[in-house]
Amino acid sequence: MSLAAAPAEVGVNRASLHQWKKEFGTGKKTRMAEAKSQAEAVSDSERIRALEKEDANLREERDILRRAAKYFAEETRW
């Protein structure tokens, strides 16, 4: 459906439809811009908290792997 045919089909004034398109946009570019603005809205403190949580998880995984490696190294000694 074209932008020219849409007002008649929907039952709105053509000028209103153009104004809505101008204000709210359409298509992929608008959705990408909204996603980008939402991603930028994440505050630094939230980002730091997420990174600290990820760091703690990685440290825990590392420690588990170290203990497993030590266990298996001792088990193979004859």
Image (cartoon, grey):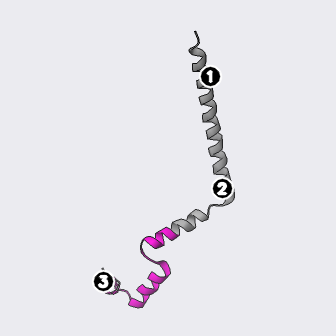
Where in the figure is residue 26, as x and y percent of width and height?
43, 76
Return the disc, 2 or 1, that comes first in the chain's sequence: 2
Number of labelled discs?
3
Residue indicated by mark 2: 46
The picture quadrant where one finds residue 18 is bottom left
CA separation, marks 2 and 1?
36 Å
Disc nearer the start of the sequence (2/3): 3
From the viewer's perspective, is the residue at label 2 or at label 1 nearer? 1
Q: Give percent across and percent down for residue 72.
A: 57, 20
Q: The C terminus is located in which quarter?
A: top right
Quadrant into which the N terminus falls: bottom left
Using the image, determine if residue 2 lies above or below residue 72.
Answer: below
- Per the rendered image, the range of residues in magenta is 4-33
Q: Are marks 2 and 1 in contact (CB under 8 Å)?
A: no
Amino acid at the residue labelled 2:
Glu
Residue where numbered disc 3 is placed: 9
- Disc 2 to disc 3, how far (Cα)? 46 Å
Q: Residues within 10 Å of mark 2 (few under 14, many from 20)?
A: few
Q: Position of residue 53 (x, y in %)?
A: 64, 45
Q: Label 1 neighbourhood size at 10 Å, few (<14), some (14-19), many (20+)?
A: few
Disc 1 target residue: 70
Question: How far is mark 1 from mark 3, CA to CA?
Answer: 73 Å
Q: Main secondary structure of the magenta part?
A: helix
